[in-house]
Amino acid sequence: MLSHTVVQMFYTLLPLEWKRYIDDIFSLWNVDKLVKEIEEFIVLANSHHPTIKFTAEIPDKEINFLDTTVFKGERFNKQAILDIPTHFKVTETFQHIYFSSCHPLGV
């Protein structure tokens, strides 16, 4: 059982948004939170189970998440809306195998 002070600390460090897809998590934090407080949250989250480890990337303007790039564009300054275009990895060659081609089904 977690102590009362640890539980209180955990609830004061909650992000504004928390989205999870399998083992990837995207979270938004209040701009008033310092990087130190976010790092405290990561340490606290890592203390709950020995085999689950959280890491964090804390950018100022943009970050890649799954196959998207989330960034603060012009709409963010005017309407507080994040822009989310598709992100292509450097190794993407846009080469595909046609279904009707002569290749094993597992390829």
Image: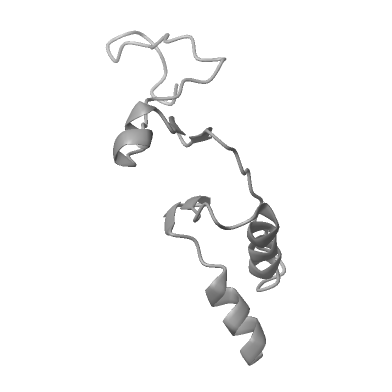
Residue 77 locus on image (x, y percent): 37, 35
Looking at the rendering, which quadrant does residue 71 occupy? top left
Q: Between residue 35 and residue 39, name the one nearer to us.
A: 35
In the image, residue 44 sits, relative to residue 101, either above or below, namely below
Relative horizontal placement of residue 104, taking residue 78 as reference (left or right): right
Which is nearer the eye, 20 or 69?
69
Residue 85 found in image quarter: top left
Image spot of residue 42 (x, y percent): 66, 61
Q: In this orientation, does residue 1 appear?
A: no
Mark count? 0
77 to 7, vertically: above or below: above
Residue 88 left/right relative to 43 = left
Seen at 66% across and 53% down, the residue is: 35
Quick one: quadrant of the C terminus?
A: top left
Q: Nearer the viewer, residue 42 or 30?
A: 30
Image coloring type: one colour
Q: Residue at x 64, y 55 (%)?
A: 34
Which image quarter is the N terminus in?
bottom right
Give how far across and how far down residue 88 sits, in percent.
47, 20
The residue at 29%/15% (across/down) is 99
Residue 57 position (above or below residue 19)? above
